[in-house]
Every structure is written in C-alpha cells, then in structure tokens.
Image (spheres, coloured by chain):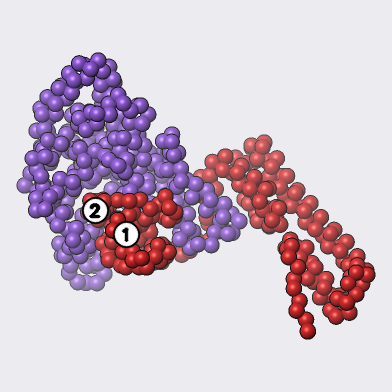
Amino acid sequence: MEIKIMATAPNDGWGFIEKEEKLFLLRPPYTTSDLIEVTIKDLSKAIHSYGFEECAISLNSMHEVVKFLKEAYIETKKTQGIELPSFEKLREGLKYATDDVLLEYLKRAKSELIPEGKFDAAESVTIDLMKLERVMTNLEMQKMAIAILENCKEERERLRDLENQIRDNQEETWKARFLGVVSIYPIDAIKKHQKAIAENGQILPMCYCGA
Amino acid sequence: MKNIFDMADQNSDNLKTRHKLLKEKHENQNNLDLFKNFIDFMRDKPTISINIRQGVLISFLIQGVYKNRYEVTTERIEELNGKRKIGISHETAMDLQLKPHKKERKIFNSTFECAEKFKYGALNIGGLGPEKFGEYCVIIKRKQSNEYSLLAFIKEDSLKYVEENSVDVERLSRDIANRECVPALVALKHENEIGGIPFDELASMICSNEGYIEAITKGEIKNVHIECVRMRQSVSNRFENDLYKALISELSDAEERYWLEAFINMRDLLHNLGIRVEVIDENGN
C-alpha cells in the first residue's frame, strides 16, 4: 500500500498524507484519533496559511510514515542545536501537574512500581513529589508519600530476610531434594541463580541443557 | 484590486435586510425569543481565535507578534540571504515552498489589497476551533478583537471562494461581514439550526474542524492580546503520561522527550505572560 506524504510541518511532526485516494492529516502522538480525514482545500489552506511545506514522498506503510515524521521532528530539533533533554530537566514539568495528577502518580507508584519490585523508581517519584510544597501540605498525599517510602523499605527488608533464609536453608534443601543437581553444579552457582530469581520475581525456571 | 474590509462594510445593508427577513420568519413561527436569544448571544460572546501548532505558538510567545506565512517566509529569506550571501527573491522562495498551491494563493492575494498582511483566524464563542490547523486554540481578548480596526468575517474559509482562475467575488461579497454584522452572518449561516441546537453545543457548531467563520485582520496580533490558550484533554493527558515516564526514567522516545520539553517551555512562557490555560474534555467542558 503506497502512502504519499503531501506536506509536512517538520517543526511539529505533522504531515498531510494521501492514502487509498483519501487525504488525511496525521499528527503526534500518531494514534488512530490523530489521523483526521481532510479535504484538498484544507491541504491548500495548511500550505497557504499555516506554514506547511509541500513535498511528495512515497512510502510503503503507516509505520514508515510515522517513522519519517518522527525523524523529521527530531532532526529539526538537532538543527536548532537543541540537545535531548535530560530526565532531570523534564521533571521540572511537575509544576504544571494538577493535584489530581500528583495523587495519581503516587497511586501508580504504590500499585504498579512496588509490586513490580521497582523500588528505586517508586522512591524516586515519591521524593520528587515530596519536594513540592503542594504535596507536603496536602494530608492525603503526604500520608501516601510517607507510606510509599516505608513500604519500599519494608519490601527491601522482606526480600533481604527471604534471601538470608534461602541462603541458610538452601544447601540443606538442595542436598536433600536435588542431590543430582548438587553433584553436577557448584552450590554457589545455584545460589546465584536462585538470588536472581528471587530479586527479579521470575516465575519460569532457568533451563540448563547440560551434557 | 479590491479592499476586503470595504467589501465587508458594503455588505452590511444586504445582511441587515436578510437578517430582518429571517427575524420575521422566526416571528411567524413563534420562535422570536429563541432567535433574539441567539442574536444576543452572538453579539455578546464572539471573539477571534487562531489554531496554532506548538512550535508556532512558542515562536509567537517569544517574538511577541503573530506572523503570517508571508512574513515568516520573508524573515527566512533575509536569514538565508545573510548567511549564504546569495540573493533569493521573495517570489522565488514562495514559489519553491508553495508549488502547485501557489496558484490559489496567487489568485486570492492578487484579488485583494495588502493580502500579504492578512492574518487568518476564526470567529469563536467557545470550544477548540478547527484543530486540524493546530492543537492549541489561541483566544484573543474580546476587548482587543473589538479594537482591530480592519476586521472582516467570511461565512466559510476564504479559499473556498477561489475558483479555477479567479475569486468568486460576487458570492464572497454576499458572504462577508464587518464586526457589527457578524451576528446576522452567523444567523444566516445557521438559520436551520437556530432553536434546534442547545446553547452549550453552539460553540462546536460555529467553530470546529467541520466548519467555521473565517476572520481576517490586517491588524497586528500581539502575545499580550491573548486571553487564554485552550487545548484538548488528550494533549494534557500526553503531558501527564510523558511526565510520569520521565519521573521513573522510562521516557525513551526522543521525540516524546523533545515534545515534553517544548510543552514545559510553552507553559513557562504562558505563565510568565499571565495567559490562562484551559483544558477542554471530550464533552466540550
């Protein structure tokens, strides 16, 4: 399926495309709702009044079109001498997040990051938010932030205890239950993999295809 | 060459007559109150809006003045001529940029005086405007829009009046209004919908992707004239999702990182200029 890019505004990653004999406007973040059917007059208007640059580039799929527009956008930034912003700089955007959004971030740290074992990320979000006066003067957010930090600490301790417990028992356990394995592999190697599984929360066992 | 603003003034008597006939029609149908309310609403509410993409809005806020296509191109040519020490005429540069579409532009511009100075917007009584031209709807202060001395409103997009080799001046001259006659122009355009559409849905009927009344001014539009900037909830959601990913260091796409930075810059500029930001949800609230 040939798709023709008719005009672009590379500064913003927008493009007018012709697909199956219809004209569309495609704009970031390039979801299905960002593809809007337009008329030839809209295209003329965009070029005539809204700074679009006319072009004629044929590509084979929407994936290629999106890639082209994204790359054009990144290229204009580079041409303007703009470096890829650091996460630290982007975190300044917190000042424009509403209280509802900040609370939602805390909820996501609690319900998504901690269960996934991403304690560093959960703590990082929480600490960034705790730097905001709005969070520390809001009782609900303040309580939740403190609870998250405590939760991370508790979870880390729980994992450490579990690890110690496993270490204490594992030699006995392995010898008692899997004598064949212990006779082939050194106990330290087994411990290393067991620790990795405990830390990553992996369910599937690692497969060894020994001779 | 014609003067588009004189054309708007000259159509006032015609619009007033047609408005009177429409009023009588509604009176005969016992709908006079609805009609009057609609006209009053159109007299009190309207201002001008311009839909702008993020990059253009940032330039507008920084430079302080909104530039049309002609002015931006002129600026670029001067920059290029300065850097490369070569001479590119304005016409050549515009031709290179506009190619087949230059014909329509040339036809329209060659019909009206000072067309290269025109700034195009839309009549707005609320809502997000024609988002296909820009996801940010810049609302001009009502007081300011009343002060633009040269202002004309057209029933549809001006390019719709461009035919094969000329502008359909006759049709355009019937469909154009000055500020005073805007309520009549709106009423005539939407005469079949008056009364049938709730007032809270009027905004999207009058100014949206599907249709709008184009506003043309020759006046200078400055950033201090901006009342507020409206954006769709989905744009705000994108900011919130990207910011969360940045907080947990998982915003890996370069374009999203650039976009988020630009969004924050834009919000900084709006904040520093004291311009309000309005987020409109899918229901238009």
**In the image, residue A71 lies at what x, y percent?**
41, 66
- Residue A40 tag number: 2
| Colour-to-chain, purple | B
The local secondary structure at tag 1 comes to loop
What residue sits 33% from the left and 31% below the top?
A: B202
Same chain assignment for discs 2 and 1:
yes
**In the image, residue B128 lies at what x, y percent?**
36, 40
Please tell me which of labels 2 and 1 falls first in the chain.
1
The numbered mark 1 sits on a residue in which chain?
Answer: A
Q: Quadrant of the C terminus of chain B?
A: top left
**In the image, residue A56 lies at what x, y percent?**
27, 66
Q: Report how far apart the C-alphas of labels 2 and 1 lie in the structure.
A: 14 Å
Q: Nearer the viewer, mark 2 or mark 1?
A: 1
Q: Residues within 10 Å of mark 1 (few under 14, many from 20)?
A: few
Observer able to see residue B78: no
Instruction: Count the marks.
Output: 2
- Which residue type does callout 1 highlight? Glu
Chain A, colour shown: red
Q: Is residue B217 above or below residue A24?
A: above
Q: Nearer the viewer, residue B67 or A103?
A: A103
Observer able to see residue B249: yes
The local secondary structure at tag 2 comes to helix
Give the residue number, with chain letter if any, for mark 1: A20
Q: Nearer the viewer, residue B278 or A35?
A: A35
Residue lying at the far bottom in this picture: please name it.
Answer: A211
- Which residue type does callout 2 highlight? Ile
Q: Quadrant of residue B47?
A: top left
The numbered mark 2 sits on a residue in which chain?
Answer: A
**In the image, residue A130 lies at what x, y percent?**
64, 46
Q: Quadrant of residue B127?
A: top left
Q: Is residue B256 above or below residue B179?
A: below
